[in-house]
Image: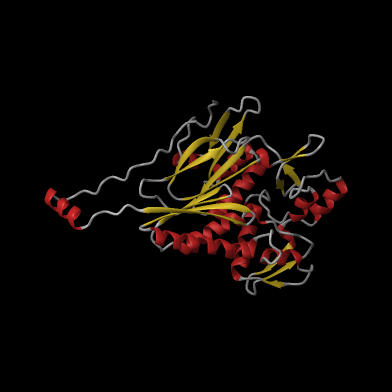
Amino acid sequence: MTRLAARFAVPPLLCLGAAACGLAAATAPSRQPVRVERTVFLMGTVATLVAETADRETGLAKLERMVRVIERTEGELSTWREDSVLSAVNRQPVGEPLAVPRAVCGLLDRLGGWSAATGGAFDPAVGGLIDVWGLRGEGRQPDDDELEAALAVSGLGHLEIDSEACDITRRAAVTLDAGGFGKGEALDRVREAERHRPGAWFIDFGGQIAVSGEVSDGPWTVGLAHPARRDTAVVELALATGSIATSGGSERDLVLEDGTRIGHIIDPRSGRPVSRSGSVTVWHESAFVADALSTALYVTGQEGGMAWAAAHGIAACFIAADPESGDVAFRATPGFESRFPLPLSSEESP
């Protein structure tokens, strides 16, 4: 494994004369920052939170605030909970408006914007398709009629949003799934809540990473997983800001008794699961955008995804894995390569 992201030492402060330096050392001894960590299970996955603050008590209080923000987000967006706002939207009778919190109303507007921008490659209104393929269970192969029926009630176009009143009306029995945006939205809400508070933080939310900034010894070190072996890092990145989200198949895909492989990510345009041997990672200042676009680019595939990401200035990296040797090749947009040096150029093979 190539190591690219060794910790960077913080350069010492310059002093105006030896006497001044000695006085500062004598009168104000430096205190090393403290890091505290907490692991919780939220939104159907494991989240690990780390905070670096001046002392342990401050760090623990910071972690508690961050967890509370994610819990409140789960109360709105989780499809694992029957009492969430999103679950209420999914149950609302067709044709009857439902008042939702303004934050959810604005979020649904953003979902529609990114769905349009990606040509429908990102569209979280695919709950019916997830059910018909059995993606929350052991998987199944629907017949053509079942697939056509599920596709007919999928897509954000079946939701009518009254932005002023914050009412949502289902025009068909469409259901939303937060798998492609919920974690990113929660991370952005943490960032906003902690924006003006001291201390740096890091969150690994089921594989999506977000940081507030550098810590005392430099950027955070983040490993990108092998597409087929998620416990093996193929490269390490120095992450100083923003969020990194990765979409891929690997062991999360389902295999039926007859050997048919079913990907866990749906292409909203065809209604069929996507199963590829590679993965795609997106960096963005917004965790929500990184989350949504990693899904969209994985659905689109390397050729179309690279072209779209480069044209829109998105920092994205596709990792292709040889199914026999396990060797990997990287292909990244200029925005990604300028931010994160890769072990090989985007056109070379291992």
* Coloration of the structure image: secondary structure
- Residue 219 lies left or right of residue 176; in this view the side is left
Q: Position of residue 30 (x, y in %)?
A: 26, 53
Q: Position of residue 33 (x, y in %)?
A: 35, 53
Considering every residue shown, the one lying at the far bottom of the view is 165
In the figure, residue 277 lies in which quadrant?
top right
- Residue pictured at 19% horizontal, 53% vertical: 25
Residue 158 sits above or below residue 179 on the image: below
Q: Position of residue 139 (x, y in %)?
A: 78, 45
In the figure, residue 195 lies in which quadrant?
bottom left
Nearer to me, 19 or 342:
19
Nearer to me, 74 or 46:
46
- Residue 98 lies left or right of residue 72; in this view the side is right
- Residue pictured at 67% horizontal, 39% vertical: 251
- Residue pictured at 79% horizontal, 69% vertical: 93
- Residue 112 lies left or right of residue 8; in this view the side is right
Nearer to me, 302 or 74:
74
Nearer to me, 10 or 279:
10
Where does the C terminus fall, quadrant-wise?
Answer: top right
- Residue pictured at 60% horizontal, 38% vertical: 230
Badge count:
0
Residue 295 sits above or below residue 275 on the image: below
Q: Position of residue 48 (x, y in %)?
A: 53, 52
